[in-house]
Image: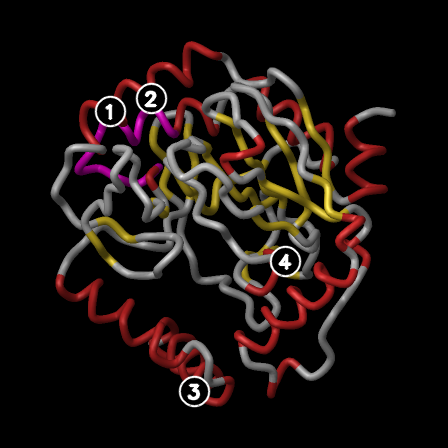
Amino acid sequence: MGLAEDYRRDGWVKVPGLVDPARIDALQAAYTTHLLPSRAKFFRQNTNRYEPNDIDGHGHVINSFLDPHHYRSVPHVRQGVLDILFDPALKAALAEATGHAELDLMQSMLFDKNAATPPHQDWWYLDSVPNGQLAATWIALEDIPAEAGRFYLMSGTHEMKLHDDLRSLRHDTWLGLMKDYVDSHADAVEAPEMRKGDVIIWNSRTIHGALPTQDPALSRKSLTAHYLPQGMVFGNLFTAKDWISFTQDGPYRYFANQPEYSLGADIKARLKVAVYDNPSLMRVARMAQKILRRA
């Protein structure tokens, strides 16, 4: 089977040894030298807050980084992330799997340690409009032992919808639906062995998450990214964000939703977290956002 056939059938596909090891080594060196010892606050994927590094007793950062491809304050790390996420072999695999020749980078996440991400489908948070065309990648930056807590997916779930009335559905309720489905279909969970440079490509509707860490001494260095086919509108299950603008940095074209730390950005992020589990308040917030953008 080819990438396109597997991706279309299962909602994901693994591509072994896809990313150039030299690019990974360059990012790892930049991370160890510039980001790991930093005392600055960065927006975190697993807490949705601006925080300094939370380093465990084994020297690994627990709180994962969101949008490191836009870290202008840490240029060596930013460049290393961009070089991997726009690796020619990776771009070619994305094009083959999705059937879209050109895709824009919409989000990135850098992990030093397993964040134990709960099962979910990406389209709640970000997707194409119409839904279902956004693609994501999970890139192993080192060999990942099973004890480190592997990334998992569930084949065929890109054809499923586990919700009905979105207007009244709370985020935590939706996550509960995801967990219930995974728990009741445990035999369908697939956690591929991942070695340095291996890549998983999956669809925005495919259920995925992370298995628990069995050995806390282990790191699980990985890089995740989400891509939107060029020409499609960005958004999610709830709204279209046709107002966004892209950054063109040399050959790299990308969007960054989360700015680097400032007091204003911190306050805005805290307000968003405060209303996130209230569907009515979120509808008001989305409406206000559209009005302000058009003003």
Instruction: Quadrant for residue 71, please give it.
Output: top left
Residue range highlighted in magenta: 69-81
The earlier-in-sequence mark between 3 and 2 is: 2
List the residue tagged with mark 4: 121
Instruction: Quadrant for residue 1, please give it.
Output: top right
Task: Give the position of the C terminus as an image quadrant.
Answer: bottom left
The earlier-in-sequence mark between 3 and 1 is: 1
List the residue tagged with mark 1: 32
For disc 3, the neighbor class at 10 Å (few under 14, some 14 to 19, many from 20) is some
For badge 2, the amino acid type reads Gln
For badge 3, the amino acid type reads Leu
For badge 1, the amino acid type reads Thr
> Residue 61 or 11: which is nearer the viewer?
61
Does the magenta portion include 187?
no
> Residue 180 or 162: which is nearer the viewer?
180
- Mark closer to the observer (3, 1): 1
For disc 2, the neighbor class at 10 Å (few under 14, some 14 to 19, many from 20) is some
Find out whether the residues at labels 3 and 1 contact each other: C-beta distance under 8 Å.
no
Does the magenta portion include 80?
yes
Label for residue 106?
none
